[in-house]
Amino acid sequence: MVQLLEKTNMGRKVLLEHINVPGIQGYDVYRSKGGYASVEKALKTMKPDDVVEEVKKSGLRGRGGAGFPTGMKWSFLAKPEGVPRYLVCNADESEPGTFKDRYLMDYIPHLLIEGMITSSYALGANTAYIYIRGEYFYLVRILEQAIAEAYAAGMLGKNILGTDYSLDLYVHPGAGAYICGEETALLESLEGKRGNPRIKPPFPAIAGLYGCPTVVNNVETIAAVGPIVNMTGDEYAKIGVGRSTGTKLISASGHIKKPGVYEIEMGITVEDFIYSDEYCGGILNDKKLKAVVAGGSSVPILPADLILTTAAGEKRLMSYESLADGGFATGTMLGSGGFIVMDESTSIVQNLHTFARFYHHESCGQCSPCREGTGWMEKIIHKILDGHGTIEDIDLLWDIQRKIEGNTICPLGDAAAWPVASAIRHFRAEFEEYVKNPSNKREVKYYFHCNNIDTAAAYSSL
Amino acid sequence: MSELKEVRFSAESEVLIQNLMKRYPEGRQKSALIPALHIAQAEFDGWLSAPVMDKIAELLSIKPIEVYEVASFYSMFNLKPVGKCLIEICRTSSCWLRGANDVVAHVEKRLGIKDGETTADGKFTLKTVECLGSCGTAPMLQIGEQFHENLTLEKVDELINKYQAETKHSAYLDGTTFRKN
């Protein structure tokens, strides 16, 4: 179980309002706190398109990382006569640094079930799936229990709440593959295949699961639909700042005093988030802040000065726009909200090695720039860390990442390229230090961990 | 050539797989493949042999190659025997920042094996894995369904002692994980 933060911050809560209520994991307590009100409101008083309209008005943007407007994504869904439509929840949370969906499903599973029902109604889906990463098997148990309770209460199944709307909801576990967080790879996996992303178009809204129109949304996105329907889209849009409406779950980890999941109202300052006692509580052991990866492993890493203030000297805010201010030259992205903090003692090159190894391990192998490039980048970083690198290697690394970016079917290639590019952009001196001063040599022991390498043989050759 | 024994699932597993197949539309029973492989792995000592995969193909009415290509893609499926207790230690950024390397080194020393190896008595296999979504409670490791978080070397020792005495296989799931639909 993830740690439950006893004193969560004071800001406005939309998703985690009742997180500290004893027994909120169960149906009865959840219902007594106003749970499933959005299902009643939507099914009994609204047409499906009215629900879509509320979500559009709310300004809700995809919480999985891309930040695409959810209402617009929904409005792209094709509705041919006699063809089933599907809603699939993306619970394949695997972006390093991100654990908010796990927290949400663990502590308040019915919020997701409620969102699935209200959203499925809006989209006209009669079957919906929650695709959850296989490593979260203990959550499969929790979700199955919650779904069983919802069926027993008449919130799922035939003629929900006596209306003519019916919905079946199932949990489907994956089996360990980051790539299945990409929506078309997820659909392939759900069809019982390898998780190779599909070429788009057609987009899932036209041809998704089993070739039928499908919407794939992140856990946090779907969980927000219930509250949006309850409070209305206009009210939700008043929370937050500018086009970053609503609240966002931030997974905070690394060298901070209080790691955990925080629901923040978008627009608080990054400085506040890191240093205030309401949130991260400052840097562990009161060391100095060195760098932050603000939105999960794939977004550009920023040094302390640029994460706290933009290049223009304004305070950086926790919002889609502010974090992206300055483009990749001096900015980053909100991404999935996986906020990894590093203190002054951290080696940026070593940390980058864990990312490069990750993307190499997780590349599906379909496109050569990614399949070959991720492995090549990992090897070069390994070589530099080992004290055998040259200045040309740093340039080569830059060159490889540039040739992966934008040249693959899915965004995994970009996700692998950006951390490398940003580490060189902002911390090139540190790479050079490893090259010029091999006494910096550090051991990277786990390089050979790869399914098709005989580890014993690999170690004996070291 | 060694003789292949006929693979038989327990009645419970077969019923479970049949039930899971009903979650997908008519003609789309292949969707149940990944859950079925998890069930098979839990029943057959934590790994998938070719005969076990062939049996799954038969149950789902698909070709064996369709099972092999999936089983070899996903990192949770073991295509070689593993120890009774599979220790999976996260090694990605946040866990690394909070000392995952020390945890790996400690387990290696304590069990006398390297990453990817199994102890001679077949009790433990050590595997380092990528981010398991436990970054706020790092470092962490997973044994079966269970996450063990905020690890200290003492906690790791306690776990190893506990599983030393365990005779059952550490599996990701059991018969009660899925709801009967």
Image (spheres, rainbow, N blue to C red):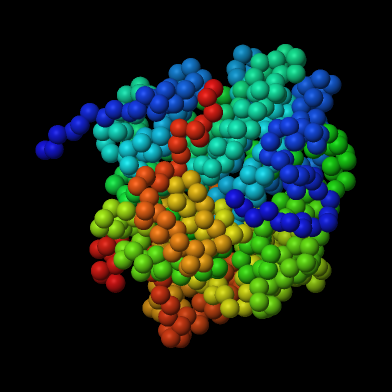
Q: Residue at x 29, y 72 (%)?
A: A462
Determine whether A17 is above or below A53 in the image: below
Q: Residue at x 50, y 49 (%)?
A: B146
Determine whether A20 is above or below A27 in the image: below
Q: Nearer the viewer, residue A355 or B122?
A: B122
What residue occupies the far front of the structure in this picture? B165
Q: Quadrant of residue A29?
A: top right
Q: Nearer the viewer, residue B26 or A213?
A: B26
Q: Nearer the viewer, residue A429 or A175?
A: A175
Determine whether A162 is above or below B150 in the image: above
The answer to whether residue A234 is visible is yes
The answer to whether residue A197 is visible is no
Residue A146's spot in the image, x, y percent? 64, 33
Determine whether A228 is above or below A428 in the image: above
Q: Residue at x 55, y 68 (%)?
A: B97
Give the left or right position of residue A242, taking residue A152 as reference. right
Q: Residue at x 60, y 33 (%)?
A: A145
Residue A211's spot in the image, x, y percent? 53, 25
Residue A11's spot in the image, x, y percent? 83, 55
